[in-house]
Image (cartoon, rainbow, N blue to C red):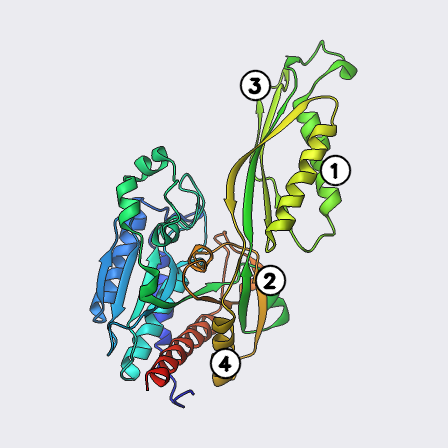
């Protein structure tokens, strides 16, 4: 049962820290705090300094994840972990990831200041959540032991080793729960004017490299009907593909990378290479969609096509008890909420496989994210942190009640 006294969260401190951290790595094109770069290290040091000033013990594991914690009265009990990531996409905004770390920091401070807590409250800033050579959600996958197959060259570029990855694996039995507060990165909450979203599931992400092979030839002397034009075939197949899925609500698909070879104006393209991304909260739907795209490739008579799997991250259902607890926290605070799936991936995705996990969404204005124009109002930022603090307190109170 709730204590009736809410943790006193420092809203101004949260907004100030979000703003100050957002200046680290900022450029004219948006945030450039890329994992393992100088701006990333500076941003992580900024957060660590704030943690230590607040009285937290801190550590950085061997892949670069930052942890800070307030010890509970029963430190042998599994801890409550909360946080998100500190890196950004190139040209990103200041809220994606960083807000969740700083809000968890403020929530932990508020609960700690309120009075004794049984469980240790730990805040994490994961590294390399965004995509890249390391595959995305890298820090949290290392934390869960799911990053062991990361390519050696990608590790070398980041200045870490396979031994570092292995040493960063945590013991999941040390944690009772993981909570991640994040901006929605979509328009649902903003459009419906709902303060809090409670994700029920996180999409799986599957990416293929698709290669269409035709025949390079002279662009001026090869008749149109005699061409084996890889670009034309790719355009035709993709037009059919996107038309076939235009009305679907159970999945989305994106082609975000496309290149032609030899890639010069006077030559009919002999090869087209692009990435095909599929996302759904149901892995069976993703698998079926991949099969449908293969059928389109094999049916084309002008060129040949192949698909090579690049990324396969399974969809995950978030813990129902965590969802209930977050909803109860919203009820304690009189905050309207709605349960919803997450179309973006998060550090919560790998962690949910090994630790009971819940997520909280705050609205994104116009649904904009991965952009310098992403924005969430100060009121919504503080409200999300208050819900997180109340959820942490509820989890700790439940543990105390169970022990008693």
The residue that label 3 is drawn on is 262
Q: Nearer the viewer, mark 4 or mark 1?
A: 4
Q: Secondary structure at mark 3?
A: loop
Separation of residues labelled 3 and 1 (CA atoms): 25 Å
User: Circle 1 is placed at which residue position?
Assistant: 240
- Mark 4 or 3 closer to N-term? 3
Which residue does the numbered mark 2 point to in the structure image?
A: 187
Q: Work out whether residue 20 can be spotted.
A: no
Between disc 2 and disc 4, whose residue precedes? 2
Q: Locate residue 316 relative to residue 59 in the image: left or right.
A: right
How many other residues sit within 10 Å of disc 4, few (<14), some (14-19) or many (≥20)? some
| 9 lies above or below 35 | below
The image quadrant of residue 315 is bottom right
Of marks 3 and 1, the one in the foreground: 1
Residue 188 visible in the picture: yes
Taking 347 as reference, is 43 left or right?
A: left
């Amino acid at each position: 049962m709730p204590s009736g006294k809410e943790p006193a969260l420092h809203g101004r401190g949260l907004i100030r820290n979000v703003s100050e951290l957002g200046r680290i790595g900022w450029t004219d094109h948006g945030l450039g705090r890329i994992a393992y770069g100088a701006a990333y290290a500076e941003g992580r040091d900024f957060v660590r300094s704030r943690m230590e000033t607040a009285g937290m013990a801190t550590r950085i594991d061997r892949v670069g994840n930052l942890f800070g914690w307030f010890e509970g009265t029963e430190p042998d009990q599994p801890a409550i972990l909360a946080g998100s990531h500190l890196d950004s996409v190139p040209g990103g905004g200041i809220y994606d990831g960083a807000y969740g770390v700083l809000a968890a920091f403020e929530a932990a401070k508020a609960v700690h200041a309120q009075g004794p807590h049984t469980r240790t409250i730990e805040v994490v800033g994961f590294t390399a959540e965004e995509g890249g050579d390391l595959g995305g959600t890298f820090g949290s996958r290392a934390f869960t032991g799911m990053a062991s197959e990361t390519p050696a060259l990608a590790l070398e570029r980041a200045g870490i080793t396979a031994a570092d990855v292995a040493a960063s694996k945590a013991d999941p039995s040390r944690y009772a729960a993981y909570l991640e507060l994040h901006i929605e990165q979509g328009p649902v909450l903003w459009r419906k004017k709902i303060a809090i979203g409670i994700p029920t599931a996180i999409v799986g992400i599957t990416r293929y490299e698709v290669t269409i092979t035709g025949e390079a030839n002279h662009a001026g002397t090869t008749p149109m009907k005699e061409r084996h034009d890889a670009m034309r075939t790719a355009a035709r197949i993709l037009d059919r593909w996107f038309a076939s899925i235009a009305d679907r609500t159970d999945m989305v698909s994106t082609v975000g990378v496309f290149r032609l070879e030899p890639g010069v104006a006077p030559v009919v393209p002999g090869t087209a290479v692009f990435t095909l991304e599929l996302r759904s909260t149901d892995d069976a739907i993703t698998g079926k969609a991949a099969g449908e795209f293969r059928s389109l490739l094999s049916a084309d008579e002008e060129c040949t096509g192949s698909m090579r799997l690049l990324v396969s991250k399974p969809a995950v259902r978030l813990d129902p008890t965590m969802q209930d607890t977050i909803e109860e926290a919203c009820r304690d605070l009189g905050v309207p909420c709605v349960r919803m799936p997450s179309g973006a991936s998060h550090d919560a995705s790998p962690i949910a496989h090994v630790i009971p996990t819940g997520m909280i969404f705050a609205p994104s204005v116009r649904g904009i994210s991965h952009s310098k124009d992403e924005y969430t109002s100060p009121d919504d930022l503080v409200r999300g942190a208050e819900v997180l603090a109340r959820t942490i307190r509820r989890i700790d109170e439940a543990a105390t009640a169970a022990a008693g």
